[in-house]
Amino acid sequence: MKESEKIKFIKEEVLTAAEAGELLGVTRQRLSTLVTSGKLEPVKKVGTVALFLLGHVQALKKELEAGRKKYRPYDE
């Protein structure tokens, strides 16, 4: 894999915690809870910085949305 391909992959497929939280529509605290509970696993964590794969975040988003529809149908 060329370096330019690696950079493109990182830019398109790797998210920071802030970006992941925004995509999921959750707070930083809720994102931290999702990580602690094992529902979302960072691909890399250095100190307080965590990086997530876009595919993992999108899969969790679908799961969370299904739960919201099931348990909070009045929100629609």
Image (cartoon, rainbow, N blue to C red):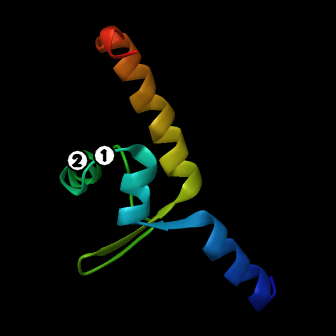
- Decide if residue 17 is on the left or right side of residue 62: left
What's the mark number on residue 60? none
Question: What SS does tag 1 mark?
Answer: loop
25 or 9: which is nearer to us? 25
Q: Quadrant of residue 64?
A: top left
Q: Quadrant of residue 48?
A: bottom left
What residue do we see at 78% from left, 80% from top? 5
What residue do we see at 40% from left, 15% from top? 76
- Decide if residue 61 is on the left or right side of residue 67: right
Q: Give residue 33's position: percent from left, percent from top.
A: 20, 48
Q: Give residue 20's position: percent from left, percent from top.
A: 42, 57
Circle count: 2
Residue density around tag 1, few if under 14, some if 14–19, many if 20 or more, within 10 Å: some
Q: Quadrant of the N terminus?
A: bottom right
- Decide if residue 27 is on the left or right side of residue 12: left
What's the mark number on residue 26? 1
Report which residue position mark 2 lands on.
30
Question: What SS does tag 2 mark?
Answer: helix
- Residue type at tag 1: Val
- Residue type at tag 2: Arg
What residue do we see at 72% from left, 77% from top? 8
Seen from this angle, which residue lies furthest right?
A: 2
Q: Do tag 1 and tag 2 residues touch (Cβ < 8 Å)?
A: yes
Q: Give residue 60's position: percent from left, percent from top.
A: 45, 40
- Decide if residue 45 is on the left or right side of residue 62: left
Seen from this angle, which residue lies furthest bottom?
A: 3
Q: In whole angstroms, how far apart are the C-alphas of marks 1 and 2?
A: 6 Å
What residue do we see at 37% from left, 21% from top? 67
Query: Given this view, does label 1 or label 2 mark the residue nearer the observer?
Result: 1
